[in-house]
Every structure is written in C-alpha cells, then in structure tokens.
Amino acid sequence: MPERASRAGGTSPSPNGRAAGAPDPDDVFDVVIIGAGPAGLSAGLNLVRARRRVLMLDSNRPRHSATLKSHGFLTRDGVSPLELRKLGREEFEHYPEATFHQALVTGIERVEEPPATATEPAANAATAATPATPAVRPAPAGELFVVRSKGIRGSGDRTATTRAVLIATGLTETLPALPGIRTFYGTDLHSCTECDGYEKSDEPLALIGETDDLAERALLLSQWSNDLIVFTNGVAELTAHDEAALDARGIGVERRPIASIEGDRTGMTGVALTDGTVILRSGGFLRPVWTPALDYGALLGVDTDDDALLVTDALGRTSVPGVFAAGDSTPPGAQQLVVAAGDGARVAATINRHLIGVL
C-alpha cells in the first residue's frame, strides 16, 4: 500500500476523513511479525487467536527450500519444509485478524507519539459487508514502531505502524564452496543431524565443514553410522581432545583439501580430494556458516551476541522494549523446525501479555 503524503500542519482532512499524516487504520497493527518460518507462523497463529491484529511480512527466502523432507515435527514427520510453511500460512490467514504480505523489510524505527487514529474500522458503504476485526488499542507514547517494507512478487511496498515487533527471520546459510555440493544438498547431503540422521543410518557418511565445532557434530552423527569420516577441507582445526574423542568412536579425520563432491544420477558416490584420491561416501552432512538474515542490531539497536544473533531474555524480549525475537535468529542459532515453532508459541504468549500491560 503506497504511503500518503501529509500536508504541512498535519490537520487538514484527507478524502477519507482522516487527518493528513495519520496512519491508515488498515496499516495499524498490534503486532508486526517479520518472517514466516515455523517460529513466525506459530507466533502469528497464537496471536490472532488472542484476537490481536497481526501483519506478517515475509521475503520468501526460506533456508530449507532445498530440503525435500523434514522430520521430528509431531504429526508432520516427513513433510517438506515448503509444505509446512504453506499449511502454516493457510491456518494463520484463516483468521480475520491476520494479514500476510510478501515483502522485504527495509527499515524499522521507533516513534514517540501514538497514532492520531487507532479506532474501529470505518463502517461505511464500502466496508459494511466486511466482517469487522478487533481494533488496535492505542499504545502509550514511546511504544510504537513504524515498519517499512519493499514488496516482492507483485506485492506493493507497505508501511505499517505497530505496538510490537516480532523478529523471526531465521538465518541464511553459506555452504562450503565446493563443486557438487548444491547438486546433492537436500537429498544426500544435509545440515541438520537431528532432522535427517535417521534416514542415513548405517551408511558410509562424510561430515564436511570448515569450522571448529566439527568434533561435536561428528560425535552426534556416530549414533546413526559407525562408518564416518570428518573432512576438514584443510581448514578446520581439531584439538587433541577432539581427536581423542573421535578416535575412541572410530571416527576418521581427513585433512586434505577437497576438490569436489562426486556422484551420478543415482546420488552421491564420494568425496574427491585435490590429490586425485576419491573416498567413497554415499551421503553426509555439512556444517554451513549461518548468519542472521538482516542486521536488526543496526536497524533497532537491539543487543546481539558475538554471532550477531539477537539476545533475548527467557521470555523472548530483546533489549528494546516492544521488540521480541524467536526461532533461529536467537541463540543458539539453527534448530529443528519443531523447536523454532515451539519458541514462536512461547514468545507469542509473552507479546500478548506485554500488550495487556502485565509484563
């Protein structure tokens, strides 16, 4: 929805009866949720069921888009992450309090004055047939945010005013820069051990990464396969303690640089090293580098940790009152889908209580 230019003085009536410069009641919300992954959708569903007017903004860049099946989600074991998002959006939009908009957030700012108009939706001839949704209760000064977004996929730009912001954008992931990885990622290669380890049971597996936490991941993977090799690509470092722990489990370590991931139309067949050696493997796991999708620390001044993840308290509140965070954009980072969804539901309860004024 395009922004309306205000006149000097800000008191002249506009054609629809609002004072010029006053926010459009249709773009005033109790909560704006940024991100429509499991955390955002779960929070949105719980908030609209609490009769909160919710705008959900999503840039349609899901981290799990290459994954064909997800696991461990109660009643949805084996569903694709994209199907899970589709079902979640349908459930959210079933409620009249819900608004979904495809857009990339470009700015968030705190405003010190409450909106001039935050009343019941107008009951004129054009809207009389539309079921009314609960009005947004005026918020005290200093507790309002303006969220600006750029529309995608044919959606228009949108500027919304809200009493609370929930950041649930998750992470972006950067895979090791190796030929062949993208070919097999989501089918033979995965990033979540808890999500996909069972399907790789008893296979000869590779764990590929360039970070210093490979040993812990390898120990987790040893629950599913006793034929596991850690590939450091000549980059990741393992401590003497790490090596002893891996050796005790019979886990091999390969430090030579990787040339490519090999395979054919049936799937992955091995890991080729730069010296020409090919080590046969039928699948494995990657350790991507995860980074927050947007720099909200810069946008809002919220506290972040050393990994740029949003620091929250046990209730999901950030260091900025009225701004909350849930899911993978908070420590410890990447988690199972069901964990992110649970986090979204938990933080939704916090937001509802914040809006009531009991938190």
Image (cartoon, grey):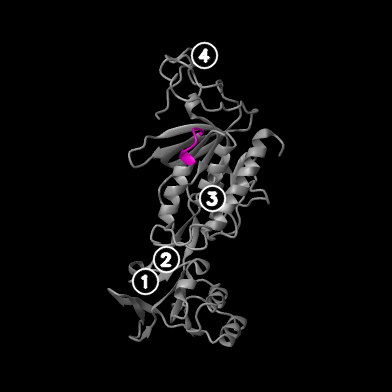
Residue 95 part of the magenta-drawn span: yes
Q: State which quadrant residue 50 falls in.
A: top right
Q: Which residue is mark 1?
A: 178
Q: In the drawing, what numbered circle is on residue 11?
A: 4
The residue to which callout 2 is attached is: 175
Residue 239: x, y in percent? 59, 80
Q: Image point 35% across, 66% down: which residue? A: 182
The magenta-colored residue range is: 92-97
Amino acid at pointer 1: Leu
Earlier along the polypeptide chain: callout 4 or callout 1? Answer: 4
Nearer-the-camera pick, 146 or 87: 87
Label 1's element? Answer: loop
**What residue did someone put label 3 on?**
39
Amino acid at the residue labelled 2 = Leu
Look at the image and tell me whether residue 276 can be seen.
yes
Q: Is residue 160 magenta?
A: no
The residue under label 3 is which amino acid type?
Ala
Q: Quadrant of residue 241?
A: bottom right
Q: Earlier in the sequence, mark 2 or mark 4?
A: 4
